[in-house]
Image (cartoon, rainbow, N blue to C red):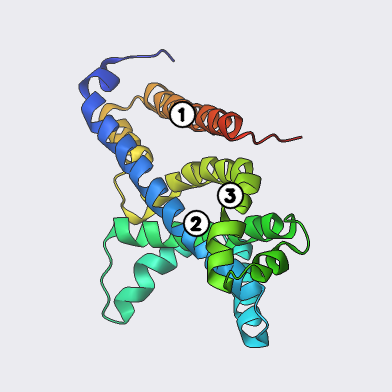
């Protein structure tokens, strides 16, 4: 079996659009996951038992079930209640909920790493709970968890290849369509794999640059 570049040359633009869709889905899910993860962490640290239980159940469900199943549920279940989500919206929602569960655990570790008594010291100088959370704790937590967030970014991008099962025209789905038309699976799938490697390498290097600039070091 040999590499034939014609399918790639003829469909370069088509595959490039798929790569952009992959990046779009990943970025949207990651951004929503940042907010969702913080919410999960706040609920998990709440003094109200019911809220802690909600956070525990949410985390257990989305960490304990396959992303593929979550994607299928996000796409098909809402339509049963008259809510029609586009494949792209369903994919973004499912990935966002999934990464929220994982990011919630990341933030939990970050908050636990903060110096004991810091909140009390902030309150002693007149800062309210929300002001302390936003201006004292959050900036430090993000510095602490930054390496883990970039790892989650990479994992999320790789997981995004599964959105093809609900008809999202991402890189993987478009590669499948090109293979069906050209009968050149080796060339097309290897090219798709290289594209994912390139994107993930860029993410990893960007993460290291930001960590270095912020003075974040990992062991």
Of residues 164 and 186, the one drawn nearer to the viewer in this rendering:
164
Residue under label 1: 193
Sequence order check: which comes first, mark 3 or mark 1?
3
Considering the numbered disc 1 on the image, is that residue within a helix, a strand or a loop?
A: helix
- Extreme-front residue of the structure: 125
The answer to whether the residues at label 3 and label 1 have Cβ atoms under 8 Å apart is no
The residue that appears at 30% across and 75% down in the rendered structure is 79
Mark 3 Cα shell of 10 Å, populated few (<14), some (14-19), many (≥20):
some
Q: What residue does disc 2 label?
A: 34
- Sequence order check: which comes first, mark 1 or mark 2? 2
Is residue 201 or residue 94 the one in the foreground? 201
In the picture, measured across the screen, residue 163 lies left or right of residue 212, that is left
C-alpha distance separating marks 1 and 2? 27 Å
Density class for disc 2 (Cα within 10 Å; few <14, some 14-19, many ≥20) is: some
Q: Residue sitting at 31 percent across and 50 percent down? A: 168
Of the residues tagged 2 and 3, which is closer to the observer?
3
Image location (x, y in percent) of residue 129: 58, 72
Residue 53 location in percent, x, y?
65, 81
Q: Name above or below for residue 126 compared with residue 47.
A: above
Q: From the viewer's perspective, is the residue at label 1 or at label 2 nearer?
A: 2
Query: For the C terminus, which image quadrant?
Result: top right
Helix, strand or loop under label 3:
helix
Q: Which image quarter is the N terminus in? A: top left
Q: Nearer the viewer, residue 140 or 209?
A: 140
Residue at 29% in and 45% down: 169
Q: Which residue is mark 3?
A: 142
Q: Are marks 1 and 2 in contact (CB under 8 Å)?
A: no
Give the numbered dot on residue 35: none
77 is higher (above) or lower (below) than 98: below
Q: CA distance from mark 2 to mark 3?
A: 10 Å
| Residue 150 sits in quarter | top right
């Amino acid at each position: 079996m040999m590499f034939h570049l014609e399918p790639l040359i003829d469909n370069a633009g088509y595959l490039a659009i798929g790569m952009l869709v992959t990046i779009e889905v990943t970025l949207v899910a990651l951004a929503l996951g940042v907010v969702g993860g913080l919410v999960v962490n706040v609920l998990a640290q709440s003094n109200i038992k019911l809220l802690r239980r909600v956070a525990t159940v949410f985390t257990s469900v989305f960490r304990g079930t396959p992303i593929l199943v979550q994607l299928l549920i996000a796409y098909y279940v809402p339509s049963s209640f008259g809510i029609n989500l586009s494949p792209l919206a369903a994919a973004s929602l499912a990935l966002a909920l999934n990464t929220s569960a994982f990011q919630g655990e990341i933030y939990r570790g970050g908050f636990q790493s903060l110096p004991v008594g810091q909140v009390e010291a902030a309150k002693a100088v007149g800062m309210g709970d929300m002001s302390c959370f936003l201006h004292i704790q959050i900036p430090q937590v993000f510095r602490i968890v930054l390496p883990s967030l970039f790892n989650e970014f990479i994992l999320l991008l790789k997981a995004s290849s599964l959105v093809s099962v609900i008809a999202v025209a991402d890189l993987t789905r478009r590669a499948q369509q090109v293979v069906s038309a050209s009968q050149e699976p080796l060339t097309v799938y290897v090219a798709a794999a290289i594209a994912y490697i390139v994107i993930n390498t860029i993410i990893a290097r960007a993460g290291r640059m930001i960590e270095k600039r912020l003075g974040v070091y990992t062991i």
